[in-house]
Image: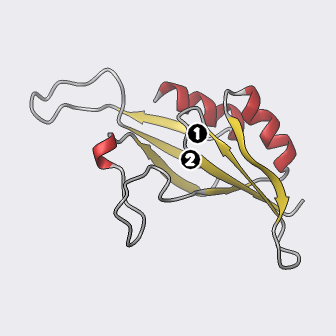
Amino acid sequence: MARVQKFYKSVFDWGLTPLPAVCPDTGKVLDEPMVVLIKAGAAEGSFIKVTEEDHLSAARGSIKSKYSVRVTITVDSIDETLKLINEAGGEVYEPKSKIPGGSMGHIAFFLDTEKNVMGLWSWK
């Protein structure tokens, strides 16, 4: 979780607060958090570490994949954000492209340090 926290803090400047993880069997506090709270302006959320057996299936699908949901983040500049992503250890998954159908803006996709596919959206 430390690597993904560093990545999102350096790229998006999100406030991140790790919560202590406790083993349900022993009550012992674990070395690494399983949940990290996110604060990004008015938006709040969390990163939750899951094991492969906890990956979700896409709707009506039977194949489990960690790519069943694609979160897209609004940014001022996709080009500048992709540069920050590369500098922070992520990589471009699909380069910036104009969304078909008129003035819908632009979209790109990237892999974070944990190889999660995430989207970027911008008018520019």
Q: Looking at the picture, how far across and down is residue 38, in whole percent? A: 52, 45
State how many labels appear: 2
Q: Nearer the viewer, residue 109 or 61?
A: 61
Reply above or below: 58 against 23. below
Q: Given contact means CB atoms under 8 Å apart, are the residues at marks 1 and 2 in contact?
A: yes
Determine the residue positioned at 36% across, 25% down: 32
Q: Looking at the picture, how far across and down is residue 57, in whole percent? A: 37, 60
Q: Secondary structure at mark 2?
A: strand
Q: Quadrant of the image for the C terminus?
A: bottom right
Q: Seen in the image, is 63 located left or right of residue 102?
A: left
Q: Quadrant of the image for the N terminus?
A: top left
- Residue 61's label in the rendered image is none
Res 63 quadrant in image: bottom left
Label 1 is placed on what type of residue? Gly
Reply above or below: 106 against 109. below
- Residue 15's label in the rendered image is 1
Determine the residue positioned at 37% across, 54% down: 64
In three-dimensional space, the C-alpha distance between marks 1 and 2, rounded to whole angstroms, equals 5 Å
Reply above or below: 27 against 120. above
Q: Seen in the image, is 117 located left or right of residue 53?
A: right
Res 49 quadrant in image: top left
Q: Seen in the image, is 87 located left or right of residue 20?
A: right
Q: Looking at the picture, how far across and down is residue 98, in whole percent? A: 86, 64
Label 2 is placed on what type of residue? Lys
Q: Looking at the picture, how far across and down is residue 46, in whole percent? A: 46, 47
- Residue 39's label in the rendered image is 2
Work out which residue is located at the far bottom of the displayed protein and give it. Answer: 101
Determine the residue positioned at 28% across, 45% down: 53
Mark closer to the chain start, 1 or 2: 1
